[in-house]
Amino acid sequence: MEDNIWAMLPEDLLHEILARVPPFLIFRLRSVCKRWNSLLQDSSFLKFHSSVPSHGPCVLSFCKNSVIPQCSVYSLPLKTWYRMCFTFLPHWAIWLIGSSGGLVCFSGCEGPTFYILVCNPLTQTWRKLPCMHFNQQRQLIMVVDRSDQSFKVIATNDICSDKSFPTEIYDSKEDRWSVHQRMPASNLCSSKMAYCDSRLYFETLSPLGLMMYRLDINCWEHIPAKFPRSLLDGYLVAGTQKRLFLVGRIGLYSTLQSIKIWELDHAKILWVEISRMPPKYFRSLLRLSAERFECFGLDNLICFTSYNQGKGLLFDVDKKIWSWIGGSAFQSYNNQACFYEPRFDASIY
């Protein structure tokens, strides 16, 4: 461990070692010397970083109660919370849209104008996207294609009313929005969307089932998948490949309520129950029958949050394991959260 030995370490070997260090610890190492401080701009380091296995999923919790945004990231592999600085973002970036492939998407209004931005929290870089053709506050989702280091942002209906707008898609490779088919008239159950296998899904009451947008042909389709009986509130969650989950609370009476998880059988167009939240977790997550909960997913992980209780609960669909997320980063009533994969090589262009 002598200093002179590490000082003579070949550059490529040093980069290969540091590329395997958890991303949140790199910031501490950057203060070691000027050489390490310039890591994030070094193409050789970024090349090694992109070739090693991902750090693993994290849960990002964002809140903007005041002028200074508060953000914490929980590393599932390390089981530790880390503070992240988001003061590099403009003041209008207050709504967390989501995260994909190391990038995080925000939106907000500056005066009468609606804006969308994409950022990499690790490198603290961001850029504002061009305005949409129909520039209203819309239902948005971002997806990253790591194979060619590009991303897309999909905008559907107006989030504040029943107005219908043409579907718009921003492609980072072209740096412009393209206009496509409107979503057919429907009564949406929720503004939550799920994206998997190049398809975007919404829950609808009329027509009953799902509305699906296919990005390969830029067309909307209706899937007549009836919802399970006694479903009170439901969320669509995307799994790996074509897996699509429905997470919802069931039971008309508080003593009989529970949360179940179903998976869509694409061939039979049928929701199949795959798991049920154990009563002890349900009672601890939602102590009152009217309490609101949120959930979001990544691959085959589903995270539940209850802001009244300030807790996060994680479910591994494959392993059938339930576990609590420690800490108190969910205690704010206007807290926003999503899964996040930290990557230095995620490009905002």
Image (cartoon, rainbow, N blue to C red):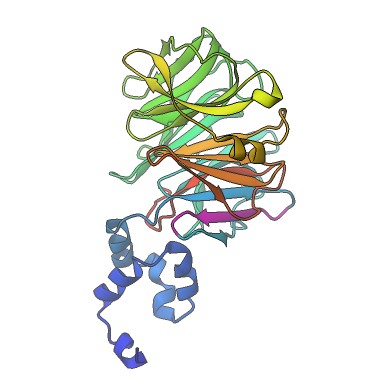
Q: Position of residue 3 (x, y in %)?
A: 36, 91
Observer-nearest residue: 33 or 321?
Answer: 321
Q: Is residue 69 magenta?
A: yes
Q: Which of 223 and 76 is in front in this view?
A: 76
Q: Position of residue 159 (x, y in %)?
A: 62, 25
Q: Quadrant of residue 298?
A: top left
* Residue 328 visible to the viewer: yes
Residue at image location 28% in from the left, 87% down from the top = 8
Q: Nearer the viewer, residue 123 or 132?
A: 123
Question: Which quadrant of the rendered structure holds the N terminus?
Answer: bottom left
Residue 190 screen position, x and y as percent: 58, 22
Q: Which residue is drawn at 40% across and 14% down?
A: 270
Relative to residue 240, is residue 55 depicted above or below?
below
Q: What stretch is highlighted in magenta?
A: 67-77
Residue 186 visible here: no
- In the rendered image, residue 46 lying in the magenta stretch gets the answer no
Q: Where is residue 226 in the image (x, y as percent from the top left)?
A: 48, 11
Q: How many labels does the image show?
A: 0
Location of residue 80 with respect to 141 vertically, above or below = below
The residue at 56%/50% (across/down) is 325
Question: Is 300 in front, or is 60?
Answer: 300
Picture quarter containing residue 157? top right
Compared across the picture, whether 204 is left or right of 175 comes to right
Q: In this view, does 146 lie to the left or right of 126?
A: left
Q: Where is 115 relative to 18, above or below?
A: above
